[in-house]
Amino acid sequence: MASNYTDRQFQGTYLFDGQMAKKGYGLNKMCYTFNEQVARDEFNTDPNAYCDKFKLSAAQKDAIHNKDIIALLREGGSIYYLAKFAGLLKLNMQDIGGLQTGMSTDEFKAMLEKNGRGEI
Amino acid sequence: MANIIGAVTTSHIPAIANAMANGLEQTPYWKPFFDAYPPVRDWLNEKKPDVIILFYNDHGLEFFIDKKPTFAIGVADEYHNADEGWGIPTIPPVTGESDLSWHIANSIVDEGFDMTICQEMKVDHGLTVPLNLMWPGHQYGHVKVIPVCINCEQYPMAQPWRTYALGQAIGRAVQSYEKDINVVVFGTGGMSHQLDGERAGFINRAFDIDCLDKLVNDPEALTKYTNIDLVEQGGAQAVELNMHIAMRGTLLGKVTELHRNYHAPISNTGSGLMLLEHEMPES
């Protein structure tokens, strides 16, 4: 039996299943700590050292360094914890949407408006 | 006997908390969203429910993926909010209802729902935003809340048929509680949205409106979807519709829709507000 949860894939969508949860465990654990101000401060003081504390892989550290949300998803990040990383960077969900889709935040917001009106 | 007198669906996104904290309700962006709430608030203030059973999902405040319950229920007399990491204000404690919570837990575990039972449970925006939407200014302390938390983050997650059945079991548990109290059920979150990946920003207005229709008239049709179907139709986080489906499961009688507003986008989501009543058959 396959260890992936489903064989249905959707373009541009990273389903957070057991494989991803295992791969991203340290990364997500680090981002979970960002609920606490003391952890956010510690990360900001020395991001690399903080990543090492959670045994992030080289690819995960690169993605954190580059604020590359798509790479973080591919490396097992869960959007709920990545949102806390985004918060630490003072980015909101529209900023994050823009980063992932190659749009400016304003372009992404305009797309949301269009989708919200049902003009898909 | 305890009675479920009605139910509400509402969005719970954190941007709402920021909008309320900053007094933005009447700005052009937010007005179509907030203007839909007074009729629901009026109904709640008129009916004065004793207890709110609130279905939500935790977004990484209480639960991490070290141990992630599929279904969890709070049984405490008080719940606390805390820093979620991205700057929405932490809000005052939420009052619980330990006796009814334990009654529900006893009843539904015996029916086969293997709940995680929580005497301490930090509650995040999934629970706090709906309460503050219904009782602005954090005036929700008088109402007792029973949190029911559904995993919407990590697969495998409970399928819609199962969350509907959970709701039905909770509905029966409330009915079998001996004290004369009135209960309202909140299904929070959703509707269509996708936060992650190159498909981020996906919203499906037609699908959301169809779901609202089916929540009123044909909930069984929603239980035919798998979570992966919801992802396809509504985006990766549309699995939050499970909270609406669970809410609908608790309504065992004939359902009437009293109020509805659909507005999109709010932040990245389609937002569905509904107020439902149901009429129990004469026993």
Image (tube, helix red, strand yellow):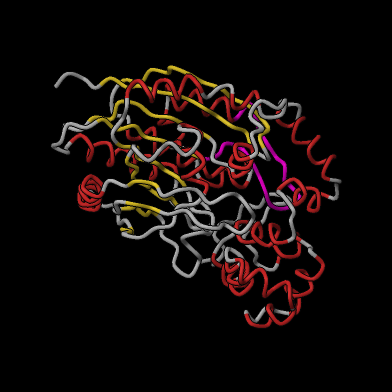
Predominant secondary structure in magenta?
A: loop
The residue lying toward the viewer, choosing from B225 and A110, is: A110
Question: What percent of the width, then of the height, locates residue B121?
Answer: 39, 58
Q: Is residue A106 left or right of residue B212?
A: right
Query: Which residues are drawn in magenta?
Result: B189-207
**Quarter of the view holding residue A82:** bottom right
Q: Residue at x 55, y 29 (%)?
A: B272
Question: What percent of the width, then of the height, locates residue A67?
Answer: 79, 64
Q: Residue at x 47, y 53 (%)?
A: B81
In the picture shown, does residue B80 fall above or below B263? Answer: below
The residue lying toward the viewer, choosing from B168 and B123, is: B123
Q: Quadrant of the N terminus of chain B?
A: top left
The residue lying toward the viewer, choosing from B47 and B6, is: B47
Question: What percent of the width, then of the height, locates residue A44?
Answer: 73, 71
**Quarter of the view holding residue A113:** top right
Q: Quadrant of the C terminus of chain B?
A: top left
In the picture shown, does residue B229 fall above or below A63? Answer: above
Q: Residue at x 46, y 31 (%)?
A: B134
Q: How many marks?
A: 0
Is residue B233 at all visible to an observer of this figure? Answer: no
Question: What percent of the width, then of the height, locates residue B56?
Answer: 45, 45
Asked whether B115 falls inside the magenta stretch, the response is: no
Asked whether B190 falls inside the magenta stretch, the response is: yes
Is residue B174 at all visible to an observer of this figure? Answer: yes
Q: Is residue B27 left or right of residue A22?
A: right
